[in-house]
Image: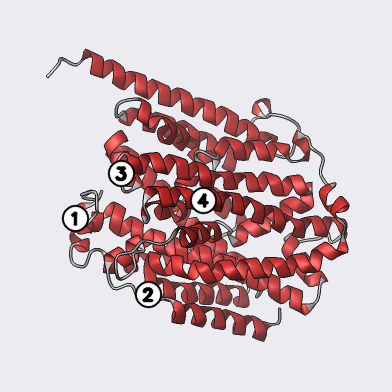
Amino acid sequence: MTSSLGWFVLAGYGALLLLLVPRAHTARSFFWAQAPGGAAPSTALLTGSVLVTWIFAKSITNAANLGERFGLLGGMAYATWYLSIPVAGLLLFTIRRAGHEGLVPFLVARFGTPAAVLFSLTILVRLFNEVWSNTAVVASYFGTAGTLPYYAAAFAFTLAVLLYSLRGGLRGSILTDRLQLALAVALLAAVLGFILPAHGPGPLLSTSTWSLGGGLDLLLVALLQVASYPFHDPVLTDRAFVTPPRRMLTAYLLAGLLGALFIVLYSFIGVHAKLAGLSGAGDAPMRVARALDTGALLIISLLMMNSAGAVLDSAFAAIARHVSVDLAGEGGAHPSGFRGLLEPLARRAREDGGLRLGRAAMVLFAVVGNLPLFATADVLKATTISGTMVLGFTFPFLLWRWHRPAPAAFVLSFLPGLVVGVWANTAAWPELLTLGDGAYRALLGANVYGLVLSGVGYGLGVAWHAAVSHRAPPG
């Protein structure tokens, strides 16, 4: 994509969405996505919103790269993480049916304030990573990392998304997801139109070796994480509380199935690169785009920009909501009566339901979230929170209904997973603890052992609280 054309597309994208997003004047609209008359988003709108906000620019790139490396199995392995959406929908349905209108209030009620604090720190890191990881993908289409065009594009893209996010909040994010989903479908169809005619169904479907060494180990990792991974992503979980529970559940079931299908289709970009011999430096989508004509490069660039924008505006809405709703309790306006975790923030939120506070949080994260673009790859790896690090969320969200409130259980489940995840992410995982012979044998081993340790910790925490309760005198 030429420099002038790229900047024209970026400016037009930001201007169009700024014009389309209605201004949210109330906390109910900004944080809870309610229409002016109080109506919640429809099932179709929520389905599309959940779907498009999980089709990250980085996800498309990862799916294509895995398709190139492992064939169709690589795409299927990555698509398995999208089963997290229906799993999250089912678990969140039970939480909402029990009367909880937010994950932080739920954790405070069932596992105490320390659990809510650990959870909040985790999702703040996740949202921090969402900013730079998506702006970096868009910037890479304007220049090489470290160059002036690269940084200029990253900051311009962030500003474009921030402006309409400040205007509409979560309601604006969900409404723009309609356009972004339509663009995603059209652009995907166009990309596949360039790729599929070059190969018959046989070659596309016969590029995999169904073994641990052929990518099956990554698929197993995804299966191990489906009950924990979604809960460290408020972009996904926030939307579970803006519609009635049954409407939410239907939307999450549909979005999960469609998301998995999208990812498999995106992986064909990489399968094409493998079949066409387009190996080389850089990501598969970029190499495929450059091998095709200028129109294909423009379409793939638009696809990445659109996907990154959908995730970034949702991340800004999520940070505003987390600060004003979860940490500040909307200054006492939370529908469940939750007072928030931080009283100083709660006092600020009482002035206007947290609108100014939420918008200030957006601006802060827009600035701070881009600082990692100046860091080295090793620093980025060390500060990224992985799915392995949050394995300890599995048991609290799966088993909370089967025992009395047990604060120690959450901590003893979360910490082993965090330790294993940090170990696996920042140092060499011991070969003795790997599983299989594939490229992801260390990751598979870390997830199996991490999940076992988290389960043991959770069980000890529940048992300890049961023993204390049994010894306590009645009354």
Task: Please tell me in which quadrant of the rendered image residue 356 appears.
Answer: bottom left
Mark 1 or 4: in front is 1
Q: Is residue 237 left or right of residue 471?
A: right
| Mark 4 or mark 3, earlier in chain | 3
Question: Comparing marks 4 and 3, which lies closer to the viewer?
Answer: 3
**Mark 3 — residue?**
100
Inspect the image, locate mark 1, and give the three-letter code of the amino acid beneath it.
Gly
- Quadrant into which the C terminus falls: top left
Looking at the picture, does residue 378 appear above or below residue 106? below
Q: Which mark is residue 383?
A: 4
Distance of label 1 from label 4 (alpha carbons):
34 Å
Nearer-N-terminus badge (3/1): 3
- Asked whether 12 or 90 is in front, the reply is 90
Residue type at the position of mark 4: Thr
Q: Which residue is mark 2?
A: 167
The residue type indicated by label 3 comes to His
Residue ID for mark 1: 332
Distance from Cα at disc 4 to Cα at disc 3: 32 Å
